Amino acid sequence: MSKAKLEQAIHSTLNKGEKAFVPYIMAGDGGLEKLEDQILFLQEAGATAIELGIPFSDPVADGPTIQEAGKRALSADTSLSGVLKCLFTFKERLDVPIILMTYINPIFIFGVEEFAKECRNSGVSGVIVPDVPVEEMDILADALKKSEIALIQLATLTSTLERIKKIASLSEGFLYAVTVKGITGTRNGFGNEVGDYLERIKKVSPVPVLAGFGISSPEQVKAMAGYCDGVIVGSKIIELIQNKDEKAIQNLVTAVK
């Protein structure tokens, strides 16, 4: 049911004529005891799915805001094992699919098979592992498939069309289209090339396409969602949670409706 839950959530949103909105938060930012309230707030706000970052000491894809959130989470002793145990305690209250964004090292330390099983037990629907290229995904694919966890792939602005086709054909749940050349973080704007890139991906992807990295305002959410099936917003959500600005988070979520 795990992978199916993610697929159904996105397709149900699209069938209503809306676009998907996936907020990203860092698990353990402020302590794991806050995680349940954070997730339930985002669920209530209307998120299609929630991407949950696992703090890691060498986060190659993360910009300053997410890196700082990761440091705060690590200083609160947050671990992959601790996050999964925490999710398990309130999984019955979750209607929204949970996607883990982690790196390969914590998964290897945990054990790939064990990781996949615990993801399923804790109600996780999908996994994103940005430091494993598609050619090496076999190290995860079988275990995740057995546990019915979606393995979500990333496409970038520098990927060739042939490579995008390959990545899209292997992505499950949705295809994560990275909209900047570089790390995460808010941006003032995006060039025309991003719209062209998203439209190109949309034409060749058999799964929905969600755009992420750098999207930080309701206007940018609307603009990006016009080219694809939805958006992922991370750094801005983390910043707004820090500022306790629930209204601004709500405005971002509803910008796709």
Image (cartoon, helix red, strand yellow):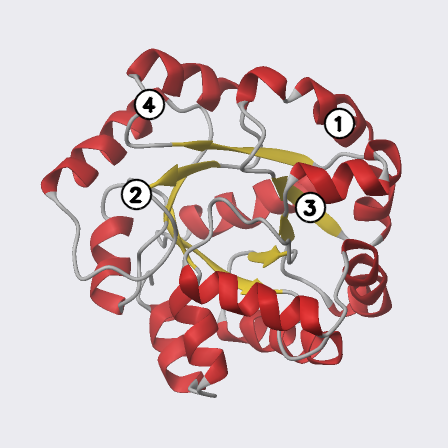
Point out residue 128 in the picture as x, y percentages from the top left corner: 59, 41
Instruction: Specify few, some or many for label 4: CA neighbours under 10 Å numbering under 14, 14-19, or 20 or more.
Output: few
Compare marks 1 and 3 and give the one earlier in the sequence: 3
Which amino acid lies under the numbered mark 2 shown in the image of this protein? Answer: Thr
The residue at 51%/68% (across/down) is 68
Residue 145's mark?
Answer: 1
As drawn, is 239 to the left or to the right of 125? left
Q: Mark 2 = which residue?
A: 179
Secondary structure category for the residue under label 3: strand
Residue 159's mark?
Answer: 4
As drawn, is 115 to the left or to the right of 30? right
Compare marks 4 and 3 and give the one earlier in the sequence: 3
Q: Quadrant of residue 30?
A: bottom right
Please determine whether, in this image, residue 57 is positioned above or below residue 76.
above
The residue at 45%/15% (across/down) is 166
Which amino acid lies under the numbered mark 1 shown in the image of this protein? Answer: Lys
Compare marks 3 and 2 and give the one earlier in the sequence: 3
